Image (cartoon, rainbow, N blue to C red):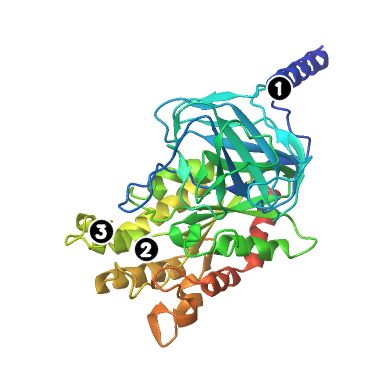
Amino acid sequence: MLKTKSRGVLIFLVVIASLAGAEPPKVHEHWVSTWSAAMHAPLPFPGLPPSPVFDNQTVRMTVRPTISGARIRIRLSNAFGTSALKIGAAHIAIAAQDSKTVPESDHALTFGGAASITIAPGAPVLSDAVDLHISQSSEIAVSIFLPSKTPSTTVHFWGQHKSYISGPGDFSGKVEMPDATPNASWYWLADVEVLASDQAGAVVTFGDSITDGVGATQGDYTDWPDLLANRLNSEPGTIPLAVVNEGIGGNRILRDGAGVSALARLDRDVLAQPGIVSLIVLEGINDIGWPHMKPKLPNGTIMKEAPFASELVTTQEVIMGLQQIIDRAHQHGISVFGGTLTPYEGADYYSQDGEATRQAVNQWIRSSGAFEGVIDFDAALRDPGHPGQFCKDYDSGDHLHPSAAGYKAMANAIDLTMLRRVVISNTKK
């Protein structure tokens, strides 16, 4: 009698899941984030272009997965919207040149079986899964049609590939978008997920502009997280390990500014991601530097007063913020690796007091034992003869962001065995 009842409950649950479009994963498979971007509100800084308002237009975004899969879904986010977001249609396809997609690769995306969706303010939504084989480090195009006037309230300002904005009309399922306007940002697209072996996992790179890839050429994928993904993908026969980039240029640990603070966005950008086994944290240089920053106005003049002068941080405050990230990640079984803060002498917001704080924070990262492992980005980039600044070849020119060679040195400084050891350990739990 009990066995019959249990079977009936199981059949009922499967039917409900099927009706909801959820399609429960097969045994020994789970969803893993293969690409992601940290969403934020449009940045309020002087000199930046206004975030666009769409109206009866299609936006096509090109992204690069970091592990392969044959079953795929996306997550759209209205995290910073103050009104409902209407998506008239959404498609996914293999990307070709510029705004084009590969013919016959296009798949319409649905949401609970419906071709369109209205997303509540502050909410995310997952699409239904589709069968589409994607290869690691290839490119896919996600196109969404916005049928009515829609301010772009939830964005990622600095994309690692151009997006394309159409003229009037729904081009989401078209191979080509004629007269498309290129754009540097991603809109509402927070995550691409694949159904993968339960041994597969993902590592989140969590940080500011140095993680976001500022200074890298769009489309070249020369930021350190993408270069790390290249290294992992070049090892045949190993457990798949995705790398998802949750950096935001200008972000801070303790305070909002460019995006909400790292402490405020940790749940959405890290803990809620599927398949995450480890986290690399490289953040804190903006907490140290911003109080000394005097931004340049659109007319080219520099502000006389530092607008963030009242937000000075101590070494202990930065350490406390990092410890909070560690403790909250550990509650979810996520291992945390600490990246030392990179040199910045010569940058616009450099100060001797700030340098002393950076050195003290780095000493704690290296010696505290709070992390599962340490990645010494500082040692990888600094000039041995002048350790407060970059080695010349690794400096992009602003003394804050690495050059392409510098990003490569950062990626090469990461011990792949250390990352993979965590994956093996976590999958055995």
The quarter of the picture where the N terminus appears is top right
Could you tell me which secondary element the residue under label 2 belongs to? helix
Residue 170 placement (x, y as % from top left): 61, 31
Q: Is residue 235 left or right of residue 319?
A: right
Label 3: how many Cα within 10 Å (few below 14, some 14–19, many 20+): few
User: Which labelled disc corresponds to residue 17?
Assistant: 1
Q: Which amino acid does label 2 sit on?
A: Ile
Identify the residue shown where x is 45% and y is 82%: 392
Query: Residue at the spot x=64%, y=35% of the render?
Result: 172
CA gap, disc 3 and disc 2: 27 Å
Q: Mark 2 points at which residue?
A: 285
Q: What residue type is disc 1 on?
A: Ala
> Where is 163 relative to 297, above or below?
above
Q: Residue 261 location, x and y as percent?
A: 37, 48
Residue at screen point 73% across, 65% down: 234
Do the residues under discs 3 and 2 have CB atoms within 8 angstroms?
no
Regarding residue 273, the answer to whether it shows in the image is no
Q: How crowded is mark 1: few (under 14 residues within 10 Å), some or many (20 or more)?
A: few
The residue that disc 3 covers is 299
- Closer to the camera in the image, 339 or 291: 291
